[in-house]
């Protein structure tokens, strides 16, 4: 149903802003440039301080201390290193404005860019005869990413506060509340440097209107109201919007013309969603004499990725099984004491390319609970045992899957494996999840959307599949560790 032009203001109270002339006179371009400069400066300081900390630590240790640089040399090297980091960050797109899903891209860069910069620094030190210690480089490869990750969390928190106060922000209305609209809203809410504040989502589908779009993230706290369409000049003026984002591919020629005309009458700029790649997986772009084509040719994963991933899986799973053996034994005893039945639980799951495998878990439900049914959505579900509630809340019931990782049927990082009866309902887009080895942790497991079925939040897994790399896997493991330390955030 169309929204009349005389809609009462209180219906859209959350989207209404003071008149444009009363808002802070900070241009979006100035805000974006300032944010970029501030983040680059923070990266420089974090990288330089991280390397100086590594030099100081190595100087206090007997290993490599004899070849550590002097204080003046360390400061000079730290400055050069900081400059290398921000140059490589810029070249890698780290200051282009957008934030990756769950900020995994930022963490990936915080791990990968320092390693590349340290290799360049080592080459420079050899050329100038500085004789930089290999031990300093090794410690720096750990210390610098740690400094950068903490620094980026602080910068993001500050930017988010500025984003909420609308300093230098252009107010954006998103047309379309589907998967694309949700992704656009989430990206804008998590990317202050872009300079757009989503204030309203308009959708012609009545089933979607009247609610809210929650940002895809760890907590799902950010949200934007959804109102019924169509787009009208009065509605856009009521929101005091600056930009109309057409985030849907299903607009007819007439609907597109009407939305564009409404935006022009309200004095808004318009941005049209150009469409996703021709396939959800990694595809190859072809440049033919300056003409860029998006193809369905799958871009192959680097050959060393699978090798490094398997080495990391085998090494870490072995180490964790040994270190956690006492805890695993204690959990097994508690399960047996809490309710009759075995401590472990074995179930068929669907793995890579649709192959079935046995997944291992600690039993968290009563022994006579149906083996294949939808997982409980509430801790008060009568099927869950007392100790099971604790295990599920802390994700400790998943620990036996380290055996799956060691055996190769699962990986540490990847989409969660689902039960056969769920996979049977998959559509073609959902089946994209099956092209990689399933994992214990991943983007979906870290998000607030983990409270809902996996197939209703396919964007997390598809994002991982399109962008997976060894460094991204390491970044997800870092986020998982932070997630566990924070108690599930």
Image (tube, grey):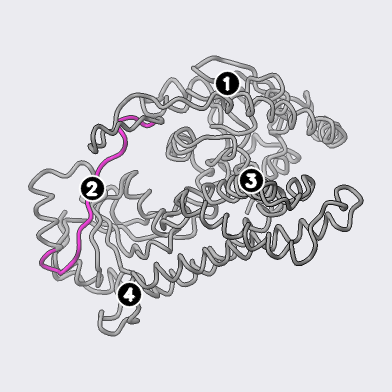
Question: Which circle, 2 or 3, is nearer the viewer?
Answer: 3
Can you say whether 452 is above or below 45 in the image? above
Closer to the camera, 134 or 214?
Answer: 134
Q: Which residue is mark 2?
A: 205
Mark 3 and mark 4 in contact (Cβ < 8 Å)? Answer: no
* First along the sequence among labels 1 and 3: 3
Q: Which mark is residue 143?
A: none
Q: Which residue is mark 4?
A: 27
Q: Which residue is mark 1?
A: 349
Mark 4 and mark 2 in contact (Cβ < 8 Å)? Answer: no
Closer to the camera, 471 or 456?
Answer: 471
Crowd class of label 2 (few under 14; some 14 to 19; many from 20; radius 10 Å): some
Q: CA distance from mark 1 to mark 4?
A: 53 Å
Q: Is residue 179 left or right of residue 458?
A: left
Q: Which residue is mark 3?
A: 115
* First along the sequence among labels 2 and 1: 2
Q: How many badges with numbers are in the image?
A: 4
Closer to the camera, 225 or 198?
Answer: 198
Q: Secondary structure at mark 3?
A: helix
Question: Which circle, 2 or 4, is nearer the viewer?
Answer: 4
Q: CA distance from mark 2 to mark 3?
A: 49 Å
* First along the sequence among labels 4 and 3: 4
Residue 251 place in picture, x, y as percent: 16, 44
Q: Secondary structure at mark 1?
A: strand
Magenta segment range? 264-280
The residue furthest bottom is: 22
* First along the sequence among labels 2 and 3: 3
């Amino acid at each position: 149903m169309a929204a009349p032009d005389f809609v009462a203001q209180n219906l859209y109270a959350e989207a209404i802003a003071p008149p444009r002339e009363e808002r802070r006179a900070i241009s979006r371009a100035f805000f974006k440039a300032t944010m970029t400069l501030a983040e680059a400066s923070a990266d420089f300081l974090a990288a330089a301080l991280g390397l100086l900390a590594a030099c100081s630590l190595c100087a206090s240790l007997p290993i490599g201390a004899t070849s550590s640089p002097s204080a003046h040399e360390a400061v000079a090297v730290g400055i050069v290193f900081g400059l290398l980091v921000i140059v490589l960050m810029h070249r890698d797109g780290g200051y282009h404005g957008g934030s990756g899903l769950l900020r995994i891209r930022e963490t990936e860069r915080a791990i990968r860019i320092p390693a590349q910069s340290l290799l360049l620094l080592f080459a420079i030190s050899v050329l100038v005869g500085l004789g930089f210690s290999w031990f300093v480089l090794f410690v720096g490869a750990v210390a610098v990413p740690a400094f950068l990750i903490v620094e980026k969390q602080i910068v993001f928190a500050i930017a988010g506060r500025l984003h909420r106060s609308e300093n230098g922000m252009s107010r954006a209305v998103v047309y379309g509340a589907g998967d694309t609209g949700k992704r656009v809203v989430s990206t804008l809410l998590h990317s202050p440097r872009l300079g757009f504040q989503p204030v309203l989502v308009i959708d012609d589908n009545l089933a979607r209107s009247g609610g809210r779009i929650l940002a895809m993230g760890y907590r799902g706290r950010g949200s934007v109201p959804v109102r019924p369409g169509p787009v009208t000049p009065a509605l856009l003026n009521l929101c005091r919007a600056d930009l109309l984002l057409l985030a849907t591919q299903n607009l007819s020629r007439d609907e597109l013309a009407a939305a564009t005309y409404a935006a022009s009458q309200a004095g808004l700029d318009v941005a049209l969603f150009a469409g996703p790649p021709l396939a959800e997986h990694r595809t190859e772009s072809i440049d033919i004499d300056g003409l860029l084509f998006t193809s369905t040719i799958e871009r192959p994963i680097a050959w060393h990725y699978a090798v490094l991933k398997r080495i990391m899986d085998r090494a870490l799973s072995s180490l964790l099984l040994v270190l956690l053996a006492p805890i695993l034994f204690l959990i097994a005893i508690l399960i047996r004491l809490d309710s009759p039945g075995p401590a472990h639980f074995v179930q068929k799951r669907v793995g890579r390319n649709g192959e079935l495998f046995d997944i291992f878990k600690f039993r968290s439900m009563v022994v006579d609970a149906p083996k294949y049914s939808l997982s409980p959505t509430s801790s008060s579900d009568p099927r869950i045992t007392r100790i099971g509630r604790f295990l599920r809340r802390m994700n400790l019931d998943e620990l036996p899957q380290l055996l799956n990782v060691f055996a190769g049927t699962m990986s540490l990082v990847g989409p969660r494996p689902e039960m056969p009866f769920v996979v049977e309902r998959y559509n073609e887009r959902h089946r994209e999840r099956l092209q990689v080895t399933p994992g214990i942790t991943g983007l979906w497991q870290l998000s607030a959307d983990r409270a809902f079925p996996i197939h209703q939040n396919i964007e997390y897994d598809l994002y991982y599949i399109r962008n997976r790399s060894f460094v991204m896997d390491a970044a997800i493991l870092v986020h998982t560790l932070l997630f566990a330390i924070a108690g599930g955030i």
